Image (cartoon, helix red, strand yellow):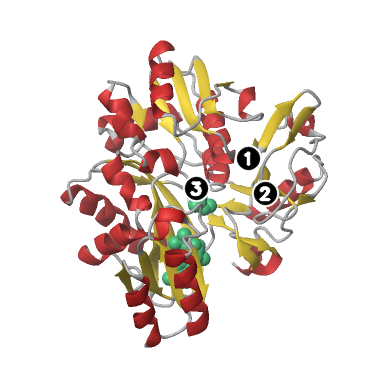
Amino acid sequence: MKVLIVGGGGREHAIAYACSKSPRVDKLYCAPGNAGIAEYATCVPIGAMEFNKLVTFAKEEQIDLTVVGMDDPLVGGIVDVFEAEGLRVFGPRKNAAILEGSKAFSKDLMKKYNIPTAGYETFDSAEEAMKYLETSDYPIVLKADGLALGKGVLICNTKEEAMDGVKTIMLDKQFGDSGNRIVIEEFMTGREISVLSYVDGNTIKIMSSAQDHKRAKDGDQGLNTGGMGTFSPSPFYTSEVDEFCKKYIYQATVDAMKAEGREFKGIIFFGLMLTPNGPKVLEYNARFGDPEAQVVLPRMKNDIIDVFEACIDGNLDKIDLQFEDNACVCVILASDGYPVAYEKGKLIKGLDNFKNRDGYYCFHAGTSLTDEGIVTNGGRVLGITAKGNTLKEARTNAYEATKWVDFDNKYMRNDIGKAIDEA
Ligand code: AMP
Ligand code: GLY
């Protein structure tokens, strides 16, 4: 069959890698793709938000299945547009992708259906929000309602910081219309875990757990980023945590969406915090995590096309989802200065070192192909990923592999997976 992937980052590279392993796939396309994805797929220069062009392409090329990796097109309704044209597509419809697209929606859903999460209030006016902050406890968390490239969350230690934050989000509109509404949330403490799942509207199947490192600098210092590295599985995702989440969070979310007339088919990514009072939902995403996909998908044993189709057709209960009994670590090589200001266009050397190396992966996030070769083209550039029998071995392997590639202004965290030592 012919498969089209929509997106062009490290996550889509990991999805393309998984699809390329399926004997059912004859031809793979990716729009817009990147220099690394081009190894498995024909990259098509169409943006992820250009729905009409994507539909035309899918019809002309007789694409059998389109897989949407990114949040923006999902929240924007790409699945509805494809379905209306009779095209087969993997991902939630617009009315379900709102689970990620609106924090106010997801918080109200959790409250209504008793799904554990932080206490919160929602405001449409800066004045009301500021009035509320006068009598709040600190620290406190401010969240722009809509999508904000993972940057719309501010943790404020004092009232002054929080007042400034409301101004930044609601009045200065730093995140555009995403800040028309704000969620003000109780600050929680604990370890964070990412749990990705496949959902077919009724059935939910949990993938192996993962842990991200969101801050730019070692020791969880510096600004929030899209994610500087991941490992899977998380040793902190114990059987007790699993049991709790199965009882109170996973199926409850799928059932809640169904009860609201918003049947969810696709990926639900649960951002969980293991608080002293038990696991709570920090956020939902309606897609694979980036760079969680890079450590979870290489460990998945199933044919990913079978799983995508089972979600679309409502047969997920028939799938026996299986993961390898090993571990995987991904270290992001970024451009120095990310997530604020950084240079692009630096030649990347050593990419060939990953050829024919079983258990090692170099997932491209921000790269492009020029006449001189493959160059950096983003803040997060490569996701250097390795497997190991244990988490420690995978971490050693991944850090060893970071030495195989080089480019000017190469930057990485040196403590990805350090938490493993505390487990
Ligand atoms: P989100 O996009 O909602 O996952 O938030 C981004 C990051 O902000 C999370 O990964 C947490 O580290 C942090 N965060 C979000 N909500 C809270 C909260 N209620 N308490 C403490 N930290 C939070
Ligand atoms: N790594 C976090 C995310 O994909 O949102």
Check disc 3 and report the residue beneath it: 289
Amino acid on which disc 2 is placed = Ile
Q: Position of residue 323 (x, y in %)?
A: 49, 42
In the picture, measured across the screen, residue 64 lies left or right of residue 354, that is left
Disc 2 from disc 1: Cα separation: 9 Å
User: Residue 308 or 188: which is nearer the viewer?
Assistant: 188
Q: Secondary structure at mark 2?
A: strand
User: Which residue does the image show at 53% across and 48% down from the upper left?
Assistant: 292
User: Which residue does the image show at 76% across and 45% down from the upper left?
Assistant: 402
The nearer-to-camera label among 2 and 1 is 1
Residue 386 sits in which quadrant? top right
Query: Decide: marks 3, 2 in contact (CB < 8 A)?
Result: no
Quadrant where the C terminus sits is bottom right
Check disc 1 and report the residue beneath it: 365
Check disc 2 and report the residue beneath it: 332
Query: Reading the chain from its start, which is encountered first: label 2 or label 1?
Result: 2
User: Residue 241 or 344: which is nearer the viewer?
Assistant: 344
The nearer-to-camera label among 1 and 3 is 1
Amino acid on which disc 3 is placed = Gly
Compared to 117, does 210 lie above or below? above
User: Residue 385 or 120: which is nearer the viewer?
Assistant: 120
Query: Reading the chain from its start, which is encountered first: label 3 or label 2?
Result: 3
Compared to 192, does 176 lie above or below? above
Compared to 70, does 423 lie above or below? below
| Number of marks in picture | 3
Query: Reading the chain from its start, which is encountered first: label 1 or label 3?
Result: 3
The residue at label 3 has a CB less than 8 Å from ligand 2: yes
Query: Decide: marks 1, 3 in contact (CB < 8 A)?
Result: no
